Amino acid sequence: MTPSGRPNPQPHARTLRAPASIEGRGLFTAATAAVTIRPARAGEGISFRRGEQRVPAHIDALSDDPIHPAFAALPPRCTILRSPGEPGAPIATVEHLLAAIAGLGVTDAIIEIDAPEVPIDDGSAAAFVDAILAAGLVDLDAPADPLRVERELRVESGDASVTISPADAPEYIYDLDYGAASPIAAASVRWSGDPDAFATQIAPARTFCLQQEAEAMTAMGLFKDLSPRDMLVIGADGPIDNDYRFEDEPARHKLLDLVGDLALVGRPLIARVHAVRAGHALNHAAARAILDSLA
């Protein structure tokens, strides 16, 4: 089953035809989690439900709590949400699931989860996309209500930046360049809002880390049940015990993260987004800048 093929922004809000379920372990917590994405009414938006707690997929719900004590003084390694203004457990590593939802043009859904972290699966968004497409998509009898930026916005940190410009249709561009000494080749990738292109060209791209990063995190007690065969670990000569799915897979995954993080604006985004070496922290700052520009 494939999406409708209609590029975003679609004229109608969209939800799932039936519930879609995924199970697996979290990357940082190793906790087993069951996730069910349920249909929602037009105007409900995207939200998470964990027990009695309901957490909107919105930048106002972003949590600064580190996913692991080792990351307390480091930039965020994932996107974590917590119900704003209320005590409650965080819901971590939501970016790949939110990217799948946004990439397929889903505007309204309730995501039930029974653990502190969304399953990582193979580090991509493919499992979420496959589950949603198997459940089916349905257009709702309501407009999609996209968010359009009216002027150019820019957030930056060092040599990383995200620039958001007015546009008639969504366009996401990610430039990855870690320098000539990096084992990861420089690349530039783009996505123009088409659900089919997202499902086949962006969603399968996996999260990655360098060999020395993986070894350092393993020494801190993380990833005990994972090996380079399970996740994309890049050494001096390329992936270790693994192969790239795309020649530019790291850049595609960074674009995937960008789509998921910017979904925290809470509405389909119509803009040209150009990110250069950006990570989660800068993506979050970009989402805030977009909403601040509407005030």
Image (cartoon, helix red, strand yellow):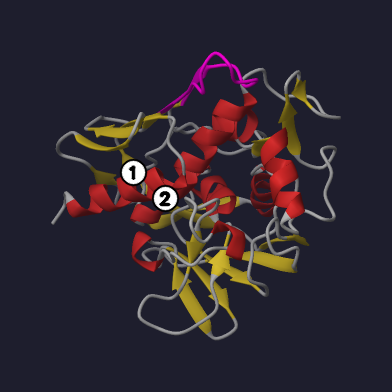
Please tell me whether residue 183 belongs to the stretch shown in magenta: yes
Residue 21's x, y, as percent?
Answer: 71, 62
Q: Residue at the location (64% across, 61% down)?
A: 118
The segment highlighted magenta reads: 173-190
For label 2, the residue is 263
Looking at numbered disc 2 in the image, what kind of residue is underneath it? Answer: Ala
**Quadrant of the rendered image containing residue 244:** top right
For label 1, the residue is 269
Query: For the residues marked 2 and 1, what is the alpha-carbon distance in whole angstroms?
Result: 8 Å
Of residues 70 and 243, the one drawn nearer to the viewer in this rendering:
70
Looking at numbered disc 1 in the image, what kind of residue is underneath it? Answer: Leu
Please tell me whether residue 179 belongs to the stretch shown in magenta: yes
How many numbered circles are shown? 2
Residue 126's x, y, as percent?
Answer: 68, 42
Q: Is residue 31 left or right of residue 80?
A: right
Question: Which image quarter holds the C terminus?
Answer: bottom left
Residue 284's x, y, as percent?
Answer: 38, 50
Nearest to N terminus: mark 2 or mark 1: 2
Of residues 162 and 53, the one drawn nearer to the viewer in this rendering:
162
